[in-house]
Image: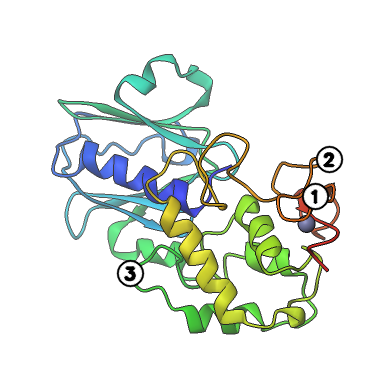
Amino acid sequence: MPEGDTVYRTAARLRDALVGRTLTRCDVRVPKFATVDLTGCVVDEVLSRGKHLFIRVGGQSGASIHSHLKMDGAWLIGGQTRRVPEFKVRIILETAETRAVGVDLGVLEILDREHDMAAVEHLGPDLLGQDWEPRVAATNLMADPERPLAEALLDQRVLAGVGNVYANELCFIVGLRPTAPVSRVKDPLRIVQRARDMLWLNRSRVNRTTTGDTRPGRDLWVYGRVGRPCRRCGTTIESDRAQTSGTDRISFWCPSCQT
Ligand SMILES: [Zn+2]
């Protein structure tokens, strides 16, 4: 599942491929924006904010291609684009040198460049942003003391960039179950800093790790490890789809390490 680090890396790849180049083709396959054609515009910059991506083209009064990967979306570039099924394509951008294809994007819209940041003004501090504010994130996290910890970590208005993998791993690291109320967090500043450290260390890695070990099967503490022994104490890892109320997300935890 795409998390903030995936989006950050995608932005870097799009930046390398497109910035400074002129679009020779712009084919938007989303009905509402199907008539938008940015052919001839120069790509100015590519930004990520939390899990949102912006491709700005055509100067200050130009356009901004806003996308969100949601569950299954991706941006493919160059040779990766050859085998994409047509029905999954949401947008095709081409330059003289390469092409970028947005596939299964959860959100794709073309915004006025001048107002594009309105799409992300609801977000909390961006874990991978230059304006990362740990104290604001920690305060947001504790705002509702009864709220389940995993749910609060996943709320992009609290802090932006955590997906289900990191939410589960962070709960393990602080020794609390995903359903524990946030009031049980002893050091809120520490948990948001750990979140930042995890995403930052993984921002340029393809194989995500939270344990510091990138070898297959050793890269995560609890996520996806139901029925297997806890790396710290050997207790069998449990999982539940209903543990995070209100969302269809699966949780993983060690019954001994997490209270
Ligand atoms: Zn354990």
* Ligand 1 sits in quadrant: bottom right
Q: In the rendered structure, which disc, 1 or 2, sits on the residue that comes first in sequence? A: 2
Q: Residue at x 83, y 48 (%)?
A: 239
Q: Residue at x 14, y 38 (%)?
A: 21
How far apart marks 1 and 2 lie (CA) works out to 11 Å
Res 234 label: 1
Picture quadrant of residue 23: top left
Res 218 label: none
How far apart marks 3 and 1 lie (CA) works out to 39 Å
The colour scheme is rainbow
Q: Which image quarter holds the C terminus?
A: bottom right
Q: In the rendered structure, which disc, 2 or 3, sits on the residue that comes first in sequence? A: 3
Residue at the extreme top: 83
Judged left or right of residue 45, residue 3 is right
Pointer 3 residue: 130
- Name the kind of residue labelled 2 in the image: Gly
Task: Describe the element under mark 1 as helix, strand or loop.
Answer: loop
Pointer 2 residue: 227
Near mark 1 (Cα within 10 A), the count class, few <14, some 14-19 or many ≥20, is few
Judged left or right of residue 27, residue 43 is left
How far apart marks 2 and 3 lie (CA) works out to 39 Å
